[in-house]
Image (cartoon, rainbow, N blue to C red):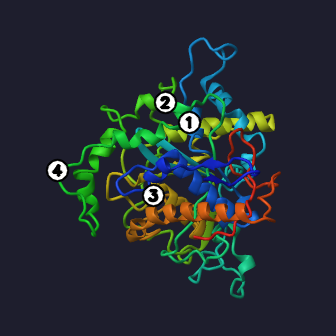
Amino acid sequence: MVYPPPPAKGGILVTNEDLHCLNDGEFLNDVIIDFYLKYLVLEKLKKEDAQRIHVFSSFFYKRLNQRERRNVPDTTNLPIQKRKHNRVKTWTRHVDLFQKDFIFVPINESAHWYLAVICFPGLEGALYEQNPLYHGPFPAPTPAADPPSEEEIPDHCRPLSPERDGLENSSAHSSPSVPEASAEGQTEGEHKENSAVADRRPEASSTPVASGNGQADPEQQYTSGLHRISVCYSSRNGEEDAYTFSDDQSSCQDECSEDGTLADDTLTSDASGSVSKSNLCKQPCILIMDSLRGPGRSTVVKTLREYLEVEWEVRKGTQRSFGKDVMKGSSPRVPQQDNFSDCGVYILQYVESFFENPIPSFHLPVNLSEWFPQQRMKTKREEIKELILKIQVQQELNKKEPNHVEAPSGSSDGLEIEETSGSTGVLPNLPISP
């Protein structure tokens, strides 16, 4: 099954082997990640909402940090930041990242999936506005106002999902889309590298992590079986695994103190609503959402900051700093996996929840521990598998219809979905809803 079907651009081929990754206990591969994110953006977002976001392929970060062959001509004299940017410079030739509110970067390192979300990269600092939903006393006297209408609610507080109010934790879909990888510097072997993670699964701990139908105690998780995964994708000395990064290892631990910090357990969940804050904050930041509280991700934040600096220089023709004072880094407290294999499923749910139940205010740190119930994850794999099979059946029926017209090709006029060479995707005309 190819989604979206021809003649739409950037179709992703999903095979029976890929479906096998959706069985319980298997690691999701890059094909499933990219397919599901693309489906959610193409099918579940209004066009105006899709224009506010950009979703990179699951290969973007890997390509950004890919080790270079020695003696590559015309690049040896460039700073490492510009050499990295050159590897992915064509991926954004049709999109201005600094006009987006949110940029999603799925990352796979050492058989573990996690998510980076770049928020408000075009802002130069924090912006505050009065919260129309706040019912408590304001710090400064303000004129009385009528209850806020839907138009008065800030854009970044509205659910991005078109048919939901974003408040139902039991809703079953959606997350941005990630497309095919850049053709530049890729081989078939690289495209299947993430698929091989199932063969590198860490050994099960002798200490049970969770019962078949129950949830493990969080503290027990990190002191028993799941701690092995943290050790698996971090190096022995506690720093980032050097294998996954290129040659810029001199400042592995970023000096930004916010990187890797977690929201305090005593904080109320920021996903439960925005009525508790008198003002709402929009500020440039990079959020790292990881279903395993393992090593710090300061190197990831640093790499993305440097990428943004070069991207700004290339696109705008001027220099701008995206240092820690401008683009803060933070690791929100998010729901945690209670097994060894669901990291990929969790990043899909993180993006889905980001769309349906958006973060109302970007005061850091952010606590999203109650973003969705753990039970929600028990059926996620089967739902994705049924979705793929349903699309396949629908495509077969469409082919048999004598007057059927395939999805139109062409520009989506701002709908940002990362393609093989950085082009934008096209909204397919498939009457499918999960």
Q: Secondary structure at mark 4?
A: loop
Cα distance between the residues tagged 3 and 2? 24 Å
Cα distance between the residues tagged 4 and 2? 32 Å
Residue 315, horizontal then vertical, whole percent: 78, 37
From the viewer's perspective, tell me whether residue 385 is left or right of residue 214. Answer: right
Q: Residue 303: give its label.
A: 1
**Looking at numbered disc 4 in the image, what kind of residue is underneath it?**
Ser
Please tell me how crowded label 4 is: few (under 14), some (14-19), or many (20+) other residues with Cα within 10 Å.
Answer: few
Cα distance between the residues tagged 3 and 4? 24 Å
Please tell me how crowded label 1 is: few (under 14), some (14-19), or many (20+) other residues with Cα within 10 Å.
Answer: some
Examine the rendering and report whether any part of residue 271 can be seen: yes
In this orientation, which residue lies closer to the viewer: 354 or 78?
354
Image quadrant where one finds the C terminus: bottom right
Nearer the camera: disc 4 or disc 2 = 4
**Looking at numbered disc 3 in the image, what kind of residue is underneath it?**
Tyr
Q: Secondary structure at mark 2?
A: loop
Kindly check if marks 1 and 2 are in contact, taking CB atoms under 8 A apart as contact: yes
Cα distance between the residues tagged 3 and 1? 23 Å
In this orientation, which residue lies closer to the viewer: 225 or 142?
225
From the viewer's perspective, tell me whether residue 266 is left or right of residue 430. Answer: left
Residue under label 2, please give it: 245
Kindly check if marks 3 and 1 are in contact, taking CB atoms under 8 A apart as contact: no
Residue under label 3, please give it: 346
Cα distance between the residues tagged 1 and 2? 10 Å
Q: Residue 105: give its label.
A: none
First-in-chain label (3 vs 1): 1
Kindly check if marks 1 and 4 are in contact, taking CB atoms under 8 A apart as contact: no
First-in-chain label (3 vs 2): 2
